């Protein structure tokens, strides 16, 4: 069943109004109209089973048939701090981590990033694009929220945010001793997990020192080195298996 997100202000006791670009998608692309059933989510974990009353390119009006709590959201909140990769890789990372249950993605401008966003306007344009990709992935995977995609941050800002998590770490190819499992099982019932992934060129040694000095441990992911676009989703799957909802 097609799923759409709306702002909570568009939902009343018995009606839902969709007046974003989704209205045109509903009428033109999906060719849905009066009497058809869709799922609408308020972005806060509540799903509505709704019947279309009227639909055109600008607005879709639905009557609420029933509502229920979305059951796809994990109990833990996971934030990925991602060193900026090339555009297509970032889009892939967003799609796959949203499907796996990420709560928040924070792009990070690190020293070995190939991509450099020049100025605030460029950052805003990219971030808007990434948020649309996150929304599309959330619809496809039946999420109850649209994961947050923030504006890019510096490493210092990322460190400050990472330290607020119950568990935080940085996968690093030169780490030989500390395993991810050791970090994930060291604390009972964590609520917030954050991890940072380096860009295509990996972390600079000075960045690793800064992370360690801030109390953020590095972990090994095994004997094979993963690409930046593989590492985030692999780590997230491990987190969800170990302390999330996949197991």
Image: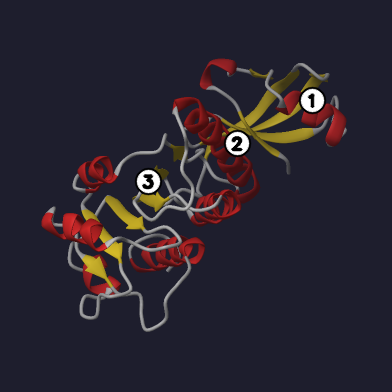
User: Distance between the Cα atoms at labels 3 and 1?
Assistant: 35 Å
Instruction: Give how far across and how far down residue 202 sits, in percent.
Output: 37, 63
Instruction: Kindly identify which residue carries mark 1.
Output: 24
| Left or right of residue 179: residue 133 | right
Going 13% across and 53% down the picture, which residue do you hit?
214
Q: Which tag is nearer the camera, tag 3 or tag 2? A: 3
Q: Which residue is mark 2?
A: 132
Q: Is residue 193 above or below residue 131?
A: below
- The residue that appears at 28% across and 44% down in the rendered structure is 158
**Is there a contact, CB below 8 Å, between mark 3 and mark 2?**
no
Give the residue pinned by disc 3. Answer: 108
The residue at the far bottom in this view is 223
Is 239 drawn above or below residue 29 in the view shown?
below
Q: Earlier in the sequence, mark 3 or mark 1?
A: 1
Q: Position of residue 97 (x, y in %)?
A: 50, 54
Left or right: 34 as drawn, with respect to 212: right
Above or below, 141 against 186 in this view is above
Q: On residue 159, which mark appears?
A: none
Task: Mark 2 vs mark 1: give the one in front.
Answer: 2
């Amino acid at each position: 069943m097609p799923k759409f997100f709306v702002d909570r202000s568009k939902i009343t006791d018995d009606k839902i109004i969709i007046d974003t670009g989704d209205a045109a998608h509903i009428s033109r692309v999906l060719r849905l109209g009066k009497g058809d059933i869709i799922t609408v989510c308020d972005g806060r974990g509540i799903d509505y089973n709704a019947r279309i009353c009227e639909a055109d390119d600008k607005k879709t009006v639905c009557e609420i048939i029933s509502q229920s709590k979305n059951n796809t959201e994990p109990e833990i909140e996971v934030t990925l701090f991602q060193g900026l990769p090339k555009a297509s890789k970032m889009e892939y990372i967003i799609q796959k981590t949203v499907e796996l249950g990420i709560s928040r993605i924070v792009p990070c401008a690190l020293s070995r990033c190939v991509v450099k966003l020049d100025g605030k306007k460029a950052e805003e344009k990219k971030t808007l694009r990434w948020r649309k990709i996150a929304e599309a992935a959330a619809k496809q995977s039946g999420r109850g929220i649209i994961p947050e995609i923030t504006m890019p941050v510096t490493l210092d800002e990322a460190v400050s945010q990472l330290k607020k998590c119950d568990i935080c770490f940085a996968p690093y190819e030169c780490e030989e001793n500390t395993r991810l499992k050791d970090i994930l099982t060291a604390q009972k019932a964590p609520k917030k997990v954050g991890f940072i992934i380096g860009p295509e060129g990996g972390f600079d040694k000075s960045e690793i020192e800064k992370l360690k000095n801030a109390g953020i441990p590095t972990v090994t992911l095994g004997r094979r080195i993963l690409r930046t676009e593989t590492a985030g989703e692999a780590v997230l799957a491990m987190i969800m298996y170990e302390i999330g909802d996949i197991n």
